[in-house]
Image (cartoon, rainbow, N blue to C red):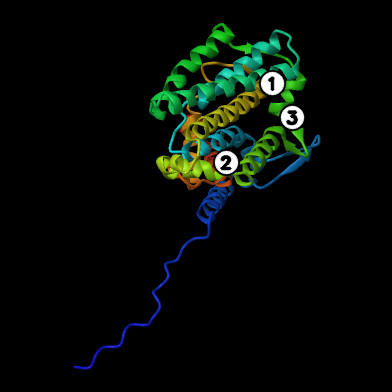
């Protein structure tokens, strides 16, 4: 019998979206729906040296979640999770307000608030990397106890302050944009340089993909895991300062409440895997914008805020 000729037709290539295209398409879709709900959604005006409008408001309100998502991305990339970022926001905000009322200078206030975030992240890192406690349980401890710490700092009261210099970080403007937006962008650039222009990003991904193989390759996995939690705590502290500066006060019970879930969702929307591995900081920020775009659309449509 004659032998059949081998099939030489090339295999069909499966269509793959370009990297980040689904996230960008989702963001555009959300903004399009928002524009249908609010006729003047795209209207942006310049007033008193600052841009105003719904798109600017989305950027401004998304800044705290974007900051949390930046830190959360690194933690999730190692295969961990940080449920304490909302509580760390409350601690940093309480520290900011209490020290401002006590009369400390602005640099001391900011450094102290950032220091609380770093210490909180270090605590989580020690529990996870050194004591080998599951990240979910380890960070749940501070998630619950952190608000108690914030209550101790504020003596169980809502603290208010009047400091124009500090308020600038929450409600001021720079280069026609709200200050929180500038802070979030600068943080994103700094963390991108830290993870993509040094070996840190590769080490984080290696730990998330296979921590045992990374350790056998000479990577100090404990330091890498601890560092990601420290950076997450730092981002949460920055977000806490912004929120406290915006409302000119600190509410230990409500500051950052459940924002850890928004941060995790932003990372997942951005394409990050909860199993760890490769990560993309920019798309995590896009995920935060998608979430805030949906929240803004709900408010513009006339539904009560509880619908968020």
Give the SS element for disc 3: loop
Seen in the image, is 298 located left or right of residue 185?
A: left
Residue holding disc 3: 172
Mark 3 surroundings within 10 Å by alpha-carbon count, few (fewer than 14), some (14 through 19), many (20 or more): some
Up/down of 39 relative to 121, above or below: below
Q: Residue at x 50, y 35 (%)?
A: 220
Image coords of residue 284 (percent x, y): 54, 43
Mark 2 residue element: helix
Mark 1 Cα-neighbour bin, 10 Å: few <14, some 14–19, many ≥20? many
Picture layout, residue 70 above or below residue 9: above
Q: Image height check: is 246 above or below 54?
A: above
**Which residue is situated farthest in the bottom direction here?**
2
Chain-order first, disc 2 or disc 1: 1
- Give residue 110's mark: 1
Residue 271: percent from the left, percent from the top?
A: 48, 48
Between disc 3 and disc 1, the foreground one is 1
Residue at 52% of width from left, 40% of height from top? 291
Task: Please name whichever residue, 16 or 251, is drawn nearer the observer in this view of the structure.
Answer: 16
**The quarter of the displayed image where residue 15 is located:** bottom left
Q: Which residue is disc 2 drawn over?
A: 200
Asked if residue 251 shows in the view, the reply is: yes
Query: Which of the marked residues, 2 or 3, is nearer the chain's N terminus?
Result: 3
Q: Give the alpha-carbon distance from disc 3 to disc 1, as whole Å.
A: 16 Å
Q: Position of residue 42 (x, y in %)?
A: 66, 47
User: Residue 295, labelled with which disc?
Assistant: none
Residue drawn 68% across the image and 27% down it: 170
**From mark 2 to mark 1, how far is it between C-alphas?**
26 Å
Q: Residues within 10 Å of mark 2 (few under 14, many from 20)?
A: some
């Amino acid at each position: 019998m004659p032998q059949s000729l081998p099939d030489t037709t090339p295999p069909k290539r499966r269509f793959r979206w370009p990297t980040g295209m689904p996230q960008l398409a989702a963001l555009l879709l959300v903004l399009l729906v928002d524009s249908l709900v609010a006729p003047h959604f795209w209207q942006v005006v310049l007033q008193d040296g600052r841009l105003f409008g719904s798109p600017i408001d989305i950027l401004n309100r998304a800044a705290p979640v974007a900051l949390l998502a930046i830190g959360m991305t690194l933690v999730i990339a190692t295969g961990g999770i940080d449920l304490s970022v909302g509580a760390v926001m409350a601690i940093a905000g309480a520290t900011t307000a209490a020290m401002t009322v006590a009369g400390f200078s602005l640099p001391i206030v900011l450094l102290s608030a950032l220091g609380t975030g770093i210490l909180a992240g270090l605590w989580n890192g020690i529990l996870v990397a050194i004591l080998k406690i599951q990240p979910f349980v380890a960070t749940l401890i501070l998630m619950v106890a952190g608000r108690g710490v914030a209550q101790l700092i504020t003596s169980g009261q809502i603290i208010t302050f009047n400091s124009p210099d500090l308020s600038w970080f929450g409600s001021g403007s720079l280069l026609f944009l709200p200050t929180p937006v500038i802070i979030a962008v600068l943080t994103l650039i700094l963390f991108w340089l830290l993870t993509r222009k040094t070996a840190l990003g590769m080490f984080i991904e290696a730990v998330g993909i296979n921590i045992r193989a990374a350790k056998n390759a000479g990577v100090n996995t404990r330091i890498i895991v601890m560092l990601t939690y420290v950076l997450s705590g730092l981002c949460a502290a920055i977000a806490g300062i912004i929120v406290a500066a915006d409302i000119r006060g600190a509410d230990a019970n409500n500051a950052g409440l459940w924002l850890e879930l928004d941060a995790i969702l932003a990372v997942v929307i951005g394409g990050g895997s909860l199993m760890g591995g490769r990560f993309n900081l920019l798309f995590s920020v896009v995920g935060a914008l998608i979430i805030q775009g949906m929240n803004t659309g709900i408010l513009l449509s006339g539904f009560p805020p509880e619908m968020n």
